[in-house]
Image: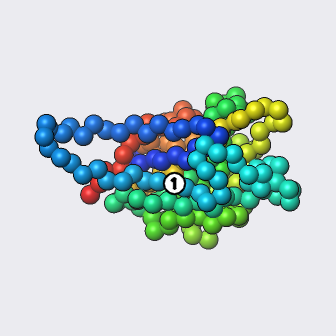
Amino acid sequence: MSVRWLAVGLAFCGALVAIPQPSDGQTAGAARTQQPRLKLTTPAFSDAGTIPLEFTCYAPSGTAKTPALRWDYVPEGTESFVLMLTGPENHRRRSHTVAFFWGRWNIPAGARQLAEAQPLGLEQSDGSYHMASDDGILGYDPPCAPPGAGPIHYQFKLYALDQMLPLAPDASRDAVLQAMDGEKSGGGFPIFRRLAPQ
């Protein structure tokens, strides 16, 4: 299966997500209008800012909640979205080098936001599914930087896909990445590919 997709990252605490872009192949003097790129934002905190405690394992209520997320500039041909929250500096498992906190796949193409405090569980009301986090949580597994560790970076990434993923509802992170990439991902993020504009 070959899936074309575009990824965008909203990174916090100073980390940035590099998104390679294909060369335009423009000829000299030829002007080309560049389409706005898929953009992921949250009203809860700023890009490269500090995540408020209510969205971490240190939530005052004892129960962390997801931040509200919004996205714009969806490419033509988008059929679904995949959302992932990772911690590149949180080497919690030896099986891979990027800690995995939250993943949701087959978010419908018409969606432009996820409200704050998304519920746990495998299947969601919009027909999308959660992947199990590194700790086996089906839903948001809040960031939990150890006290005194200093700034630790977390990345929210949104992928626009040109199809729904035909996977079993309990698909793992690796299975979703493999389906997105069309080949074995080895547990890491596949190469970013842009969803071609129509």
Determine the secondary structure under disc 1: strand
Q: Which residue sits at x=77%, y=39%?
A: 145
Q: Is residue 52 shown left or right of residue 44?
A: right
Q: Is residue 112 shown left or right of residue 132?
A: left
Residue farthest bottom in this picture:
125
Q: Where residue 15 appears, x then y in whole percent? A: 59, 37
Q: Which residue sits at x=50%, y=59%?
A: 71
Figure check: 127 above or below 180: below
Q: Which residue bears the numbered disc 1? A: 40
Figure check: 12 above or below 166: above
Q: Is residue 67 shown left or right of residue 4?
A: right
Q: Where residue 193 appears, x then y in whole percent? A: 38, 42
Figure check: 125 above or below 136: below
In the foreground, 189 or 55: 55
What's the amino acid at mark 1? Leu
Q: Which residue sits at x=46%, y=47%?
A: 7
Q: Is residue 43 shown left or right of residue 107?
A: right
In the foreground, 33 or 159: 33
Q: Which residue sits at x=43%, y=39%?
A: 19
Q: Can residue 41 be seen in this view?
A: yes
Q: Where residue 183 appears, x then y in whole percent? A: 44, 38
Q: How is the image coloured?
A: rainbow
Quadrant where the C terminus lies?
Answer: bottom left
